Structures are given as C-alpha cells and as structure tokens.
C-alpha cells in the first residue's frame, strides 16, 4: 500500500504532536484499518486543525486506590444486565440477560454474567460452607473450601447457556434486542477442581452411572448428570456423547475470571458442566450424590424438557447445540450511515470447537465465510468478523455456525418442523436482523427459511 493513499488514524499523544508538525501529519484524508482502506467519512474524519486541549489535560487526576476495586467508566453506565419485567412474577425466580451487544472479545466480565435463580441469589460464608460427596462411593467425604483448593487446579474458558435462551422467540414474541433474544449465555474462565479427582478421592463405585448436584439456596436446585453406562429412568441408554464425554470436563469451580466466584454465580463453589445446559451447573453447591439412575427431579420434568410436534416431550437433552448471533449490527447497535463496517458476532457449541461461521446480508440467499478470531477454544465463545461495505439499503443480516462435528445451525423452519411452536428450550436457530435504510435494526423472524 503506498504512502499516498493512507494515513494512520488520528491517535497517540495528541499534545506532543500539537507542538510539532501535526498539520502535515493530519492532512491526509483516508484512514487504514486492518489493511483495508476505509473512507474517511466512515471511520475517522479528515482533520485540518489540532484538537482543542481538553480540561483533563489541565488537572491532577484521582489518586491510586481512591477506588480500591476498579469499576467501569461512568460513560459505560448503559452496559448492564437487564431483566424482562413481564417474564417472571418477581425478580427472585427470574433471569437477567447479558448485554452481548456491548461485549468485545470472548470473555464476559463477571459483573455482566447473566443470572438465573430459581430461589434468588444467596450469600454464603466460605468458612462454614461444606460439600458432601456420598452415595455409591467407597468413602463418603465432607470437604471445606480449603480442602478443595488443595487439589490440582483445572480451568477452562467455557460458555454457560441456559437452554431457555431464545425461549420467547419460539411462540412468535420478537424481542427487539440481542440482549433479550440471546443474552442467557455468557463466557468465563472458570477455575476449580476436576470432578475426576474428587471421584478418585471418594472412590466412586462401578454401579454409579449418574450423579446429581444440589445447591444450598432456597431452590435447593438438583440436576442429574450422566456417567458412562447411564440409562434413563426407563432403562434406555442415553447418548454415548452425553454418557462418555460430558463428565470428563466437569469441575467444582471456585474462581471466575481471575477471582472468587461472584455471589450471583454460585459463591463459594458451583458445578461447571461445560457445553451443557446451564441448569446442570449447580450453584452454591453443597452435595454431590452418586447414583445408578437419574433423579427425575422437578427441574428435569416440569422444566428443561422439549415439547415435540407430536405432543410428546423429549428429556435429557443436555448439550447446548451450536448457536451464533450477530452482535453488530443488531437492534441495540444501529448503523450510522452507509460506508465501511465490520459485522461482528459470537458463535458457540456445546460439543466442541466452532469450525466455521457463514454470514449473509441478503436474508440467506448468499453466504460468505466469516473470519474466526483467535483464540478458538472448545465449548467457548468464538468471535467472528466480516468486513461489510453497506450501501445504505435495506439488508437482512444473519449468521450460521458449524461446529467441529459438522453440525450446522438450523433455520427456525427446521426447528419448528421438528418441534412445533410450543417449545421453550434449545432454540438455536439462525437469527435475522433487518437493517433499515435509516440505520435502525430490528428483529425479524423468517419462518419461511
Ligand atoms: N443452586 C442453584 N443452582 C443453579 C440455579 C439455581 O437457581 N440454584 N439456576 C440454574 C440455572 S437454570 C442456570 S441457567 C444457571 C445460571 O447460572 P448463572 O446464574 O451463573 O448464569 O445456574 C443453574 N444453577
Ligand atoms: Mo436455566
């Protein structure tokens, strides 16, 4: 690229520059980003005069530890978890959604992790909290938090998704916000103890084909997790992947993004069952019991089953299937005039790594492969991007993810053909955003596709 048609975007140390030869430096009118030439009107404008000296150049700032635990800038106050008031009768058995539209990269800051409580969040003193592991084991044991921290650490970057993510869309309710259509998923670096190490410590017996975890909250939430040889309550074997794979990654987590778990996310300990519907990741964990059949709890019957077209219900659909969504543009982040943009989004799969993401801007008539941004981890958010020169006309923006097993994210039509419209859970269909000529972006469900 020749010097003639490029300049660096206006940046670094403006003040030092102002005293020197900044006029010539700023005279050129086209900026470069990521190797692509971008019209100056779109990203960074031509500047003829030095910038005015801002007031912050003339004061002394805050001293260190005036804010002992750092918080986001006051200008980021709009970046918050939100709930949908009409969705639940109160905020105790309820949900808050992650502002996916404001996230960059693949990690969800702990304070923005979505919350799903069946009986509210509780504050637990780690010094008195205990975890009991019992049932089909040689040696039942009780662990303190300190005991657990003495085991070797196991960690991973894993997403957590409530299977009710997108539930409101099943029946035609169209939330005009990516925060509410997809915000029941977050991604975290979790740190804890491997379940395999704890299984070794208590000596799990061969007859154990399931375990369940139980929380110390008002809901005392219980969920069954399969082990090799697992059969359902009718004696039918469950899928090999579920029985033989899921348990190997599981940890009892005590840390999240570099620090202790947040109370809302299960402090002081919780299960993390990577790739599986998040209700299996029992928070405020107090009990693990090894058993030889699923518990068939309230959570596994009244909730978390999938209505099918023929009126029957599917049980123990544990894995979060491949999903993706464009987070820019989206209803929460509009366009500001035609020109150069980067379409950005997130993809994830409970079965492993995201292999590819296709993006369409014409409602699925044509697709182009997006770039996957490093790092790409298994059962983790994967960021994708695609350059887009917007002509200012109406567009239908979609993303379609494929994982390393070859599973391709379905259309809504395909899901409805399989399951009808009475469903709540596991809605992972392709999302369409309609970009209007005026730059507004809206949620449109293309049931025909
Ligand atoms: N003890 C307990 N564990 C729980 C829950 C709960 O209410 N109590 N909610 C479950 C559900 S339904 C989900 S989706 C996830 C949500 O985890 P998060 O609040 O950390 O996002 O926690 C699961 N673990
Ligand atoms: Mo959930």
Image (spheres, grey):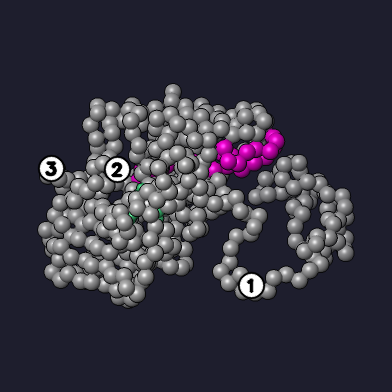
Where disc 1 sits, the SS reads loop
Query: Relative to 315, is 448 on the left or the right?
Result: right
Which contiguous range is marked in magenta? 320-342
The Cα–Cα distance between marks 2 and 3, rounded to whole angstroms, is 18 Å
Question: Is 271 part of what is drawn in magenta?
Answer: no
Q: Residue at x 60, y 60 (%)?
A: 72
Q: Residue at x 36, y 44 (%)?
A: 163
The Cα–Cα distance between marks 3 and 1, rounded to whole angstroms, is 61 Å
2 vs 3, front mark: 2
Residue at image mark 1: 66
Q: Does label 3 or label 1 sit earlier along the sequence? A: 1
Which quarter of the picture shows residue 301? top left
Of residues 221 and 148, the one drawn nearer to the viewer in this rendering: 221
Q: Residues within 10 Å of mark 2 (few under 14, many from 20)?
A: many
Query: Relative to 205, is 92 on the left or the right?
Result: right
Residue at image mark 3: 234
Q: Position of residue 381 (x, y in %)?
A: 45, 51
Q: Position of residue 375 (x, y in %)?
A: 49, 56
Residue at image mark 2: 304
Of residues 447 and 306, the one drawn nearer to the viewer in this rendering: 306
Q: Is residue 365 visible?
A: yes
Check if mark 2's residue and mark 1's residue have beta carbons within 8 Å: no
Ligand 2 within 8 Å of the CB at mark 2:
yes
Q: Residue at x 64, y 41 (%)?
A: 341
Q: Position of residue 376 (x, y in %)?
A: 46, 53
Where disc 2 sits, the SS reads loop
Q: Residue at x 51, y 29 (%)?
A: 444
The vertical placement of 316 against 446, above or below, is below
Which quarter of the picture shows residue 289? bottom left
Where disc 3 sits, the SS reads loop
């Amino acid at each position: 690229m020749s010097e003639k048609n490029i300049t660096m975007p206006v940046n670094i140390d403006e003040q030092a520059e102002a005293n020197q030869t900044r006029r010539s430096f700023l005279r050129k009118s086209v900026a470069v980003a990521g190797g692509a030439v971008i019209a100056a009107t779109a990203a960074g404008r031509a500047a003829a005069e030095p910038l005015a000296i801002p007031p912050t150049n003339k004061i002394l700032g805050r001293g260190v530890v005036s804010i002992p635990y750092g918080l986001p800038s006051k200008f980021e106050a709009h970046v918050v978890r939100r709930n949908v008031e009409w969705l639940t009768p109160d905020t105790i058995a309820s949900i808050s959604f992650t502002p996916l539209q404001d996230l960059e990269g693949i990690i969800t800051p702990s304070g923005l992790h979505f919350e799903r409580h069946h009986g509210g969040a509780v504050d637990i003193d780690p010094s008195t909290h205990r975890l009991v592991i019992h049932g089909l084991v040689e040696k039942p044991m009780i662990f303190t938090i300190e005991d657990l921290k003495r085991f070797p650490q196991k960690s991973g970057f894993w997403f957590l998704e409530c299977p009710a993510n997108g539930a409101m869309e099943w029946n035609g309710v169209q939330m005009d916000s990516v925060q509410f259509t997809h915000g029941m998923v977050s991604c975290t670096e979790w740190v804890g103890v491997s379940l395999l190490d704890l299984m070794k410590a208590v000596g799990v017996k061969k007859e154990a084909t399931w375990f369940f975890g139980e929380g110390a909250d008002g809901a005392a939430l219980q969920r069954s997790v399969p082990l090799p040889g697992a059969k359902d309550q009718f004696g039918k074997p469950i899928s090999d992947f579920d029985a033989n794979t899921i348990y190997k990654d599981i940890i009892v987590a005590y840390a999240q993004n570099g620090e202790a778990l947040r109370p809302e996310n299960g402090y002081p300990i919780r299960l993390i069952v990577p790739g599986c519907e998040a209700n299996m990741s029992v928070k405020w964990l107090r009990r693990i019991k090894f058993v030889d059949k699923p518990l068939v709890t309230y959570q596994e019957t009244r909730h978390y089953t999938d209505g099918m077209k023929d009126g029957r219900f599917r049980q123990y659909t544990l894995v979060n299937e491949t999903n993706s969504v464009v987070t820019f543009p989206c209803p929460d982040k509009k366009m500001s005039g035609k020109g150069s943009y980067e379409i950005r989004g997130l993809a994830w799969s409970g079965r492993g790594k995201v292999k590819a993401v296709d993006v369409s801007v014409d409602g699925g008539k044509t697709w182009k492969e997006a770039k996957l941004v490093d790092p790409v981890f298994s059962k983790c958010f994967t960021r994708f991007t695609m350059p887009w020169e917007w002509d200012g006309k109406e567009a239908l923006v979609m993303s379609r993810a494929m994982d390393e097993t070859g599973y391709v994210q379905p259309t809504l039509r395909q899901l409805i053909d399989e399951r009808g419209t009475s469903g709540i859970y596991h809605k992972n269909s392709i999302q369409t955003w309609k970009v209007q000529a005026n730059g507004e972006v809206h949620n449109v469900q293309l049931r025909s596709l």
